[in-house]
Image (spheres, rainbow, N blue to C red):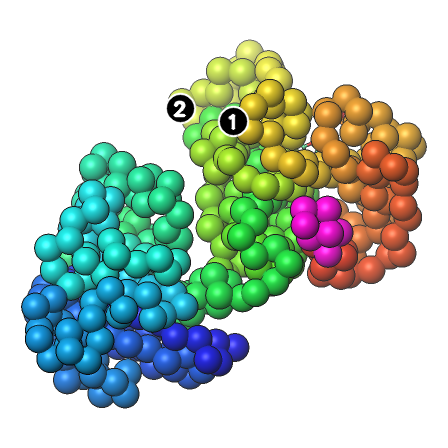
């Protein structure tokens, strides 16, 4: 899938560098050629010999190596690839990238390049959580650098949390997504998906039957057409697609915050089944049975995320697509929902229990746009997703 693609792989100095050896192998298995660059600190973790043996190429190490400069200057090296991948991107390397340092070969290449860059951060959880690293990450994102990972889990240092480098196959999927040329290449699209959980107390919550499968299928279909997808998901049954930026949330309020962080985007698809209400003053301690009878729950309204984004005065995505989960008068209700919320399209579906749509594999939808309604035949959620992604591509290009 990466045939004829050329990756410049910068290996930073972290324990995760050992995974970069496997990454080289996986990238080559996908058909890519890999030119490795090893930082001084990287050499403490993996040897130049093993890196070059796996890459089948010499490894570049030194900014002031006259042999390198005679063969290929660092400027040319920085621009000769289809994509530069920094893995592991250590806290130090990310800081250098964010600040624009150029004091060694890796940072100089990253500053001199006009090639897209992807970074796979890897560091101790406290270093990742540190405001300085979070600032640097935001700067890098703003500079258009794609990030893959980090993942959460046990770390080599014995701690647990976010900071583990993404697995080699996840990085390969992200590389494929970045390099795939499709009608949505260069477009950034937000997809919300799954249910939300609204807490009653620390152990109980209010949820709904959404499995997240339609939203996940849409995110995958948009990715396959080349879009850079930001996927904001509640606690769904299905795993998020690979090769997309995933933001996991639980409540509607958290979903709104995540959506606002993800903006600006070219299009936003709101497939999530967001709870309309949350429990007012959810208890911080577990509610106990008391003799005084059943507890009374008070509710307050959640923010309407779709309406908030549809009605933005500045920075509104050019295309906003909502879903309408209805059980009665599907098209009428969905048509007025489109007007009320201010979105461009509504994907209406009948979620009555008998249809088996909520949580099922198929969907039966009516697409309502400014120019009318279209009934689509019942089909798999994957097919709905592909057809919708094609329509989105036509509307954005
Ligand atoms: N939606 C949202 N935020 C909410 C509620 C809904 O973003 N707080 C979005 C959903 O993601 C979906 C659309 O609005 O795209 C419609 O959701 P639906 O549940 O059908 O509509 P409601 O706004 O809840 O209206 P009602 O319950 O009156 O049918």
At horizontal 64% and vertical 58% (from top left) the residue drawn is 183
Query: Left or right of 41: which side holds 304?
Result: right
Q: Position of residue 152 (x, y in %)?
A: 33, 53
Quadrant location of residue 293? top right
Label 2 to label 1: alpha-carbon separation: 21 Å
Q: Quadrant of ligand 1?
A: top right
Which is more N-terminal, label 1 or label 2? 1
Q: Position of residue 229 (x, y in %)?
A: 54, 50
154 over 284 or under it: above or below: below
Task: Judge: label 2 CB < 8 Å from ligand 1.
Answer: no
Secondary element at tag 1: helix
Is residue 198 or residue 130 the one in the foreground? 130
Query: Looking at the image, can residue 169 be seen?
Result: yes
Query: Left or right of 351: which side holds 104?
Result: left
At horizontal 41% and vertical 68% (from top left) the residue drawn is 82
In the rendered image, the residue lying farthest to the top is 292
Is residue 81 or residue 243 the one in the foreground? 81
At horizontal 15% and vertical 78% (from top left) the residue drawn is 70
Q: Position of residue 180 (x, y in %)?
A: 54, 66
- Mark 1, Cα crowd under 10 Å, few <14 / some 14-19 / many 20+, is some
Q: Which residues are magenta?
A: 390-397
User: Answer yes or no: do the residues labelled 2 and 1 have beta carbons within 8 Å?
Assistant: no
In the rendered image, the residue lying farthest to the front is 70
Query: Left or right of 352: which side holds 388?
Result: left
Asked if the magenta segment contains residue 393, the reply would be yes
Mark 2 or 1: the one toward you: 1
- Mark 2, Cα crowd under 10 Å, few <14 / some 14-19 / many 20+, is few
Q: Position of residue 45 (x, y in %)?
A: 12, 70
At horizontal 60% and vertical 20% (from top left) the residue drawn is 313
Secondary element at tag 2: loop
Q: Badge 2 is on which residue?
A: 285
Q: Which mark is residue 253?
A: 1
């Amino acid at each position: 899938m990466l045939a004829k693609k050329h990756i410049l792989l910068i290996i930073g100095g972290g324990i995760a560098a050992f995974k970069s050896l496997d990454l080289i192998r996986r990238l080559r298995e996908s058909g890519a050629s890999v030119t490795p660059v090893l930082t001084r600190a990287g050499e403490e973790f993996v040897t130049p010999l093993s890196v070059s043996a796996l890459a089948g190429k010499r490894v570049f190490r030194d900014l002031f190596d006259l042999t390198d400069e005679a063969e290929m200057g660092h400027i040319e090296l920085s621009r000769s690839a289809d994509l530069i991948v920094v893995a592991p991107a250590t806290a130090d390397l990310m800081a250098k990238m964010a600040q624009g340092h150029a004091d060694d070969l890796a940072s100089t290449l990253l500053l001199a390049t006009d090639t897209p860059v992807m970074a796979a951060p890897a560091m101790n959880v406290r270093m990742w959580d540190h405001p300085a690293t979070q600032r640097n990450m935001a700067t890098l994102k703003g500079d258009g650098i794609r990030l893959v990972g980090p993942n959460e889990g046990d770390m080599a240092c014995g701690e647990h949390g976010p900071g583990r480098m993404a697995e080699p196959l996840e990085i390969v999927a992200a590389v494929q997504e970045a390099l795939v040329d499709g009608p949505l290449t260069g477009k950034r699209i937000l997809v919300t998906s799954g249910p939300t959980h609204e807490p009653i107390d620390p152990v109980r919550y209010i949820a709904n039957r959404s499995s997240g499968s339609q939203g996940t299928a849409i995110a995958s279909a948009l990715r396959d057409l080349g879009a850079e997808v930001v996927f904001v998901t509640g606690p769904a049954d299905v795993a998020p697609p690979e090769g997309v930026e995933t933001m996991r949330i639980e409540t509607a309020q958290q979903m709104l915050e995540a959506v606002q962080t993800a903006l600006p985007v070219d299009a936003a698809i709101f497939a999530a089944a967001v709870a309309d209400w949350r429990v007012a003053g959810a208890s911080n301690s577990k509610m106990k049975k008391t003799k005084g009878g059943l507890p009374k729950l008070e509710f307050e309204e959640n923010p309407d995320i779709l309406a908030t984004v549809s009605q933005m005065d500045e920075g509104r995505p050019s295309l906003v697509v909502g879903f309408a989960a209805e059980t009665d008068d599907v098209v009428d209700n969905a048509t007025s929902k489109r007007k009320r919320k201010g979105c461009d399209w509504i994907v209406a579906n009948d979620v009555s229990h008998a249809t088996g749509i909520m949580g099922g594999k198929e969907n039966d939808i009516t697409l309502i746009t400014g120019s009318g309604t279209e009934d689509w035949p019942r089909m798999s959620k994957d097919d709905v997703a592909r057809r919708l992604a094609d329509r989105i591509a036509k509307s954005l290009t």
